[in-house]
Image: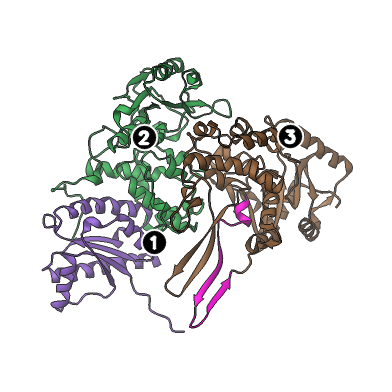
Chain colours: A purple, B brown, C green
Amino acid sequence: METKEKKLNIVGFLCNWCSYAGADMTGLGRNIYPANIKVIRIPCTGRMDPMMVIEAFHKGADGVLISGCHPGDCHYSEGNYYWRRRYAHLKELLDFFGIDKRRFHASWVSASEGKKFAEVVKKVVIETEEWKKSTLK
Amino acid sequence: MQNKLITQENLKALVNELAASNDVFAPKRENENTVSFGKINSFDEYVPGVLLTNTTVKDKVYLQSEQLFQYELKKDTVEFKEKAPGKEAVIFGGRPCDARGFDVIDKLFNWSGYEDGPYTGGRKNTTIITVSCEKPELTCFCTSFAGGSPADGKGSDILLTPVSGKFLAEVLTERGEKLAAKYSKYFTDASDAETAAKAEFAKAAETKITKKLDLAAVKKNLDSSFDSPYWDTVHLPCVKCGACTYVCPTCYCFDITEKKFGYLNGERNRTWDSCMSEMFTKMAGGHNPRTDTKRRFRQRFMHKFRYHVDNFKEELCTGCGRCIRRCPVGIDIRKVVEEAK
Amino acid sequence: MEKEMQEIAKKLLAEKKVDWVIGYENSFEPGASRPVFINKPEDAVKLVFNKSCVNNLSVYLPKVKKQKAAVIAKGCDLRSVREIIKEHQILRENVVIIGVACEGVDSSKCATCRENKLDGADFTVGAVKDLGRKEDLSDIEKFEKLSSSEKEAFWNKEFERCIRCYACRNVCPVCYCPDCFANRLMPEYLNKVVNTAENKVFQQIRMQHVFGRCTDCRACEEACPVGIKLSLLTKKMSKDAKKLFNYESGKDTDSRPPLSTFKVDEEGIVEIM
């Protein structure tokens, strides 16, 4: 039986209008980013239920990234404002429960920021890896 | 079998030796106000002074969540893998009301010729050493039930009662005999005087119980009060949580659920379910005949003191009083069934 | 003080101003009390108030619905009442608040009592004294400094003994959702299997749902049959609500809970890439 290398599992929730399109641009622009991220498309970060983040970590995600439109540019006007508040407290709450801050990230990536998305994913992977290494010590 | 005697030091040595080769569960301190049954590695972790632990011993034999089997879809068949039987275990330091609970639910899990595998397997592997109670609490009412007493051995394999500085060890079952024989170096034979001293102890403890339910009257009350407006008001303080059902030595209701690990395999589990939960009577298709909070409340008391009596000729209760102590709003089961009209 | 409370309750019921009076009565042992629902004026003599009156009675208000109820409230309970009114679970005109001056009950929360004032109560029984006690967040700050692995190990140990009785959820005044996520099977957010991981998920989601609405009344911690330290979580959330959104729940009945609103220019609360 072959042993598989345990790769980092990052789950990404990308808002349909900005970040998902932005991630598409990353591919079109041939910007390379780590393949650890598994993308889930949501209509808006305002839809992002914190319960999904908790479930993702419970089901074995090493890291979670939520990405949406820049504040002021939300396709549905206000969704990302609500998300911003949820993220702020959820990060603290999860950290208090023992889910390291380096595992949970959020970003604003617009539809044209293909390069930025690649940088964001790279950063998420690096920080999650850092956390993972610290648990093995 | 001849009653045995064991000294405090020998008891300590016995428990330590048992803990070295078996899983021994005994009252263990979790934090400043919680003592629960947990696995101990030495006698020193055992907390002897607490009469009523936060939870009961039931979950050491009848696990709260138990895997029944795992399944895997192969090309043309389905492969089942049943869980291997558990290790030998000893439950030490429970009370007669805890042990009696097993006696009551034994009849449920071995009924009409059907033997429940996981439960019976757990029972076969577990030896129960119970300690009699010297100072019953205000919430105790074990003497209300036939043969119930702070020093009764029903459901126990070995019953320990403090007499003249040592413990009288009544070996009551085959399992108890096996343990006593294996560790016979710790036991000596008890004399008639010590056996008599135990009877004195039991009598003294029984008189300390302040409340005795008239079960015949209770049954009559419940038989006639199903549609009574009494239930409309008595259920109001209850928050329908389920704490009472989970700390009860005799509550046995369960739910069976499945869990998937991907597309091809998964497991089937059995988990305790509480009649206080709204989900208890929810059916496939969404119909739920008992969503009303009053009905759920009434159901619990009817089941324990009326329906179970009709079916099994005994109450589904051992009088331990845990439901009264652990209820967040102090509902007293004795008061509820006595005043039902 | 008890006499005064009984008189008020008797009058309210006799004049049919309320259908129910929710208070405390003597329980199974001397010195213990428990919640009671009274609907007849002559039963008002059952009402008591002493150090054992720990329960937060506001949990019953969302269930009163179209009827009118009077509720006995200590300073801490009053915060929950305000929060429930704010969230439209009961109309202000359908609840009569009988505030009771409290100097502390048999609970660990009283040493750090944040508020025993009874502003907004319809009746005040007893004289409210300034106890000079303050909130103490030092144990939260100490816990925050632990590493993630240490925190995880701590919570694993706590939730190992959780029996998923849902007492914490059912006594919480702001957990009033008729279809709680824990009861839903399709989709299944929470598996019925009881183990440490699922127990943690339940509490994580529940705490997230009550963030900003929880008044740190400690009803959950008092109700837990196995003594899980939920106060660490409720205190942490209270601290965060203040720090991140400058919000304290239960102070009034018209401000909006923090997650139900937003500011276009949040004062640099969080780093987002």
> Do the residues marked 3 and 1 share a common chain?
no
Q: Which residue lies at the image location 56% right of the left edge and 46% below the top edge?
A: B245
Image height check: is B170 above or below B239?
below
Q: Which residue is mark 2?
A: C65
Q: Which mark is residue B149?
A: none
Q: Image check: B10 left or right of C78?
A: right
Image height check: is C42 above or below C271?
above
> Do the residues marked 3 and 2 share a common chain?
no
Q: Which residue is mark 3?
A: B205
Q: Which quadrant would residue B115 be assigned to in this image?
A: bottom right
Foreground: disc 3 or disc 2: 2
Image height check: is A61 above or below B62?
below
**Residue B198 visible within the image:** yes
Q: Which residue is mark 1?
A: A58
Tag 3 near tag 2, CB within 8 Å: no
For badge 3, the amino acid type reads Ala
Image coordinates of residue A107 in percent, x first then y, are 19, 61
Q: Which residues are magenta?
A: B57-82
Image coordinates of residue A32 in percent, x first then y, are 19, 77
Q: Image check: C254 left or right of B120?
A: left
For badge 1, the amino acid type reads His
Toward the viewer: B128 or B139? B139
Which chain is disc 3 placed on?
Answer: B
